[in-house]
Image (cartoon, coloured by chain):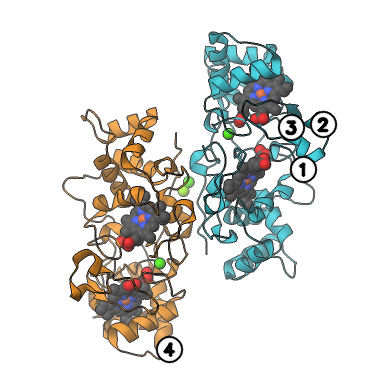
Chain colours: A orange, B cyan
Amino acid sequence: EYMDFFEPLPYLPPIPANNSLTPEKIELGKMLFFEPRISGSGVISCATCHNPALGWSDRIPTAVGHDGQVGNRNTPTVLNSGFLGSQFWDGREPDLEGQALGPIEAEIEMNMDLEAAIRRLKEFDIYHEHFAAAFPGEDDPIRAENIAFAIASFERTLNTPNSPLDRFLAGDVQAMSDSQVEGMKLFVDAGCVACHNGPALTDSGFHRFELPGSTDEGRFIVTGDEADMFAFRTPTLRNVAVTYPYFNNGSVDNLHDAVQLMGQQMLGQDFSDEELDNLVAFMHALTGEMPDLEIPALP
Amino acid sequence: EYMDFFEPLPYLPPIPANNSLTPEKIELGKMLFFEPRISGSGVISCATCHNPALGWSDRIPTAVGHDGQVGNRNTPTVLNSGFLGSQFWDGREPDLEGQALGPIEAEIEMNMDLEAAIRRLKEFDIYHEHFAAAFPGEDDPIRAENIAFAIASFERTLNTPNSPLDRFLAGDVQAMSDSQVEGMKLFVDAGCVACHNGPALTDSGFHRFELPGSTDEGRFIVTGDEADMFAFRTPTLRNVAVTYPYFNNGSVDNLHDAVQLMGQQMLGQDFSDEELDNLVAFMHALTGEMPDLEIPALP
Ligand code: HEC
Ligand code: HEC
Ligand code: HEC
Ligand code: HEC
Ligand SMILES: [Ca+2]
Ligand SMILES: [Ca+2]
Ligand SMILES: [Ca+2]
Ligand SMILES: [Mg+2]
């Protein structure tokens, strides 16, 4: 049965033992996610690039950060990022806690010294209250590790259940169109599921992908292992219809071409027009319900 | 009676005869307000500077726009902007319709040619649908004037009712603290109401204000009339506690100093510490309920 190859999205991703998911941390993490005062310019927050209006990404090929600087890589959505086995295109961080502080300090992203960011947060009474509530019993809770804990907690709530695929898997056979069902079957038969599997449709593994025009060495930069040259972590396919453009440098702007390139490069296969249409239709069945977000009122 | 000097905030500001307020225009206007693809960089929208998490402003002295360029003026909130008799610190636009297209083209803000912005919008089916629904019967509704109509309509819904002052005026004598009531009385007695009156606490008039360190010629730039040198349009005081920093160049970062400077410059009066405390407390009574916003899902 084709359906055995897929898993519905659970309500929550795995929660690490050292960072229990509390409402206080989630609320604080939300504030920090929208907080531009922890950037060097005072105007860039996580939500600038991971924009809730744009599928929690930015819909440009590669990210634009501090002073309009253009990066090399496409901004992945943070939706369902708690389900990933590692973070970043090259998997250089194991989890969301490890990931969270990087962009604050990155010169090309938020360009702010972490100590300065902490001093800035300490100027606001409301942050003292929220950190104390989220990390009770600590003498000096406004510190780097807790920023990471809080942001990661918020991100673990940004999940998109009830996509057509999820409803189909739950037994609602009307939830997907005929073309989407055909696409799902081909996705299995052609071998896409070898890499795109599990609740987020990624094995979180690294696979060589030679993207026309890209010189990004990918996983090799992290490991220095020749076998990892040009290898990238399989991205989630959840909400892929709203997270264009595609691939690590955002050079492909539509799903048709993205799926075709996957077939050619990963499977050595050239799909017919009808097959491509069905696969693309199936990609659209992976768009779930967006988180219902109340924008935080920052101090 | 002191209360006669104040007006509760109506549910809606005046609606112009040529731009009726429809749900379709409001929804479209919301999308455009959050739309970064109508900026040259593809990453700046109205909401970048008029950030809902920051009182629909940016909480920095002067705006940062395209490529990190820093402007000369403080970003006013768009909350209750439909109640203003003119737009911008120098009142150079009469209404929200006149205001809306300026920032898209301003090199230092969004830096995008209007024709290019229109072409960009036309790439999305969903904008064809939304413009057609908002402006029924038009052959080619995606045009500059309609962008302005839609954005202005959305802005007219961004009002903040039920502040402590409004509840007090409605008869709830507990809604303001004793200090706030004292501040309200002094606000009348000292003469602040001469300029800060009406539902938005502004006369929408222009008044000379010599801000230490500022060379901005204000209204003079618009009229060329010497009498308007260094004159600025009285800003709304609604939500003033959350729209720091203050004045046309954002050079004063707290209400205490802002109110003190107003007393000295506009009224030739030096308030005692207690008077200042009461006036500042009253300023806090002007913070209303923030609009309950559903972030739009952009195409
Ligand atoms: C200037 C744009 C920008 C800003 C600001 C930014 N990000 Fe990102 N984000 C990116 C880009 C680009 C990547 C991919 C980088 C890479 O793979 O090397 C990324 C990757 C991520 C990932 C990994 C997702 C995945 O699928 O691997 C997470 C999670 C994330 N960002 C969260 C955040 C948080 C939290 C903040 C704020 C503290 C933030 N980002 C600020 C652009 C940005
Ligand atoms: C051998 C592993 C593997 C196989 C097989 C595979 N993929 Fe991928 N897929 C990846 C990797 C790795 C990437 C990221 C490539 C990059 O951007 O560097 C990716 C990226 C994608 C993307 C772009 C996602 C984004 O957000 O940028 C789509 C769409 C996609 N795959 C669909 C498919 C489909 C459909 C198939 C089958 C026809 C398939 N993949 C087969 C590993 C695989
Ligand atoms: C780069 C920052 C920036 C962007 C982007 C921006 N604004 Fe503004 N906005 C400002 C500044 C600064 C002013 C004051 C300028 C002046 O008075 O000369 C202002 C003034 C206004 C005003 C007048 C309010 C008042 O009290 O007079 C309105 C309304 C407004 N903007 C709406 C918008 C809309 C709609 C957009 C998008 C189409 C937008 N703004 C984009 C910074 C920005
Ligand atoms: C003669 C007219 C006039 C009088 C009287 C007056 N104001 Fe103002 N007020 C203005 C103008 C004009 C500005 C804008 C000045 C600027 O930034 O260029 C302003 C700005 C302010 C601001 C800063 C608002 C912001 O968002 O930047 C506050 C607070 C304020 N006034 C409070 C008061 C108080 C309290 C009093 C009485 C003690 C008072 N004003 C008396 C005209 C007046
Ligand atoms: Ca993408
Ligand atoms: Ca809401
Ligand atoms: Ca201000
Ligand atoms: Mg809701």
Q: Position of residue B13 (x, y in %)?
A: 70, 39
Q: Earlier in the sequence, mark 3 or mark 2?
A: 3
What amino acid is labelled 2 in the image?
Answer: Glu
Give the structural element (helix, strand or loop) at label 2. helix
Q: Is residue B35 above or below residue B182?
A: below
Q: Are marks 1 and 3 on the same chain?
A: yes
Tag 2 residue:
B226
Q: Position of residue B9 (x, y in %)?
A: 65, 31
Q: Quadrant of the N terminus of chain B?
A: top right
**Eye-nearest disc, 3 or 2:** 2
What amino acid is labelled 3 in the image?
Answer: Ser
Q: Which chain does the residue under circle 2 lie in?
A: B
What amino acid is labelled 1 in the image?
Answer: Pro
Tag 4 residue:
A274
Q: Mark 1: is the Cβ under 8 angstroms from ligand 3?
A: no
Q: Quadrant of residue A193?
A: bottom left
Rounded to the nearest angstrom, the CA distance separating label 1 from label 3 is: 11 Å
Q: Which chain does the residue under circle 3 lie in?
A: B
Q: Is residue B236 left or right of residue B239?
A: right
Tag 1 residue:
B94
Rounded to the nearest angstrom, the CA distance separating label 4 from label 3 is: 62 Å
Tag 3 residue:
B204
